[in-house]
Image: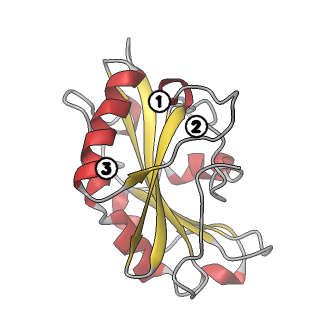
Amino acid sequence: MSPTSPSAPARAGLAAALLVPAAFLGGCSLIGGDGCHGTGGDLKRLAAEPVLGTAPARAAEPANYRGTGVTTGCDDDSSGAPWLHADRLYAFPGGPGDVVAHYTRAAAAAGWRPERDPSAVAAPASVEGACWTRTEHGRHLLLTVDFRTGFISPAPAVGSGIAFEVSVGSKADGNGGGEATCWH
């Protein structure tokens, strides 16, 4: 998966945010630019997206991330509108295909549209992850499921299963979130 969401390049900073309890949803700025000021309300709305709380049966927070729940962040590299995101990390005893199938059903039920990678050499969704889009209150949102969790420190303790991250994000540009897309 090659998401174009600004959160992808800033994933290393997200590792620290995963250690922050969900009570800290007020509007954290992972990369310090001025564009993150005043985004607390938008971050709370993203964190309240119901799809972040749905997961396949038997999925749970990784053993070493108990109590973390949903985390939020604002990535502002000052080269454009900041990227706001709410994320949740899960451990799952099944396979990636089961995760993608679950979120495909949950996303469709909530009005999300799948966005397929147009690249002829794209990896299958069960390898790297999947992405859906939706417009809500004039804001373009991305829902991603990502199996690439190697950047997270400490590594999620999943036992014999897999780790995955589900994220809802949007640009904070004051113009309805702009047109974000899942793929380059």
Q: Please, what is the three-letter code of the amino acid marked with disc 2? A: Ile
Q: Which residue is mark 1?
A: 156
Which of labels 3 and 2 is toward the front? 3
* x and y percentages locating residue 59 in the rendered image: 27, 31
Question: Where residue 147 sits in the image (x, y, percent)?
Answer: 51, 31
Quadrant the N terminus occupies: top right
Q: Residue at point 37% right, 81% down?
A: 137
Residue 133 lies, in percent from the top left, at: 45, 58
Position of residue 101 relative to residue 179, above or below, is: above
Q: Give the structural element (helix, strand or loop) at label 1.
A: loop
Q: Residue 119's image quarter?
A: top right
Splitting the image into 4 quarters, where does residue 111 fall?
A: bottom left
**Residue neighbourhood size for the residue with mark 1, other residues' Cα within 10 Å, grouped as few (<14), some (14–19), many (≥20):** many
Q: Is residue 25 visible?
A: no
Label 1 amino acid? Answer: Pro
Q: Is residue 48 left or right of residue 140?
A: left
Residue at image point 38% right, 17% down:
161
Q: Determine if residue 44 is in view.
A: yes
Q: Residue at x 54, y 77 (%)?
A: 177
The Cα atoms of the two marked residues, 3 and 2, are separated by 25 Å
| Mark 3 and mark 1: Cα distance apart in space | 25 Å
Residue ID at (66%, 82%): 35
Q: Is residue 93 left or right of residue 80?
A: left
Which residue is disc 2 drawn over? 152
Residue at which label 3 appears: 107
> The disc labelled 3 sits on which kind of residue?
Ala
The one of 136 and 162 positioned closer to us in this rendering: 136
Answer whether labels 1 and 2 touch (C-beta < 8 Å). Answer: yes
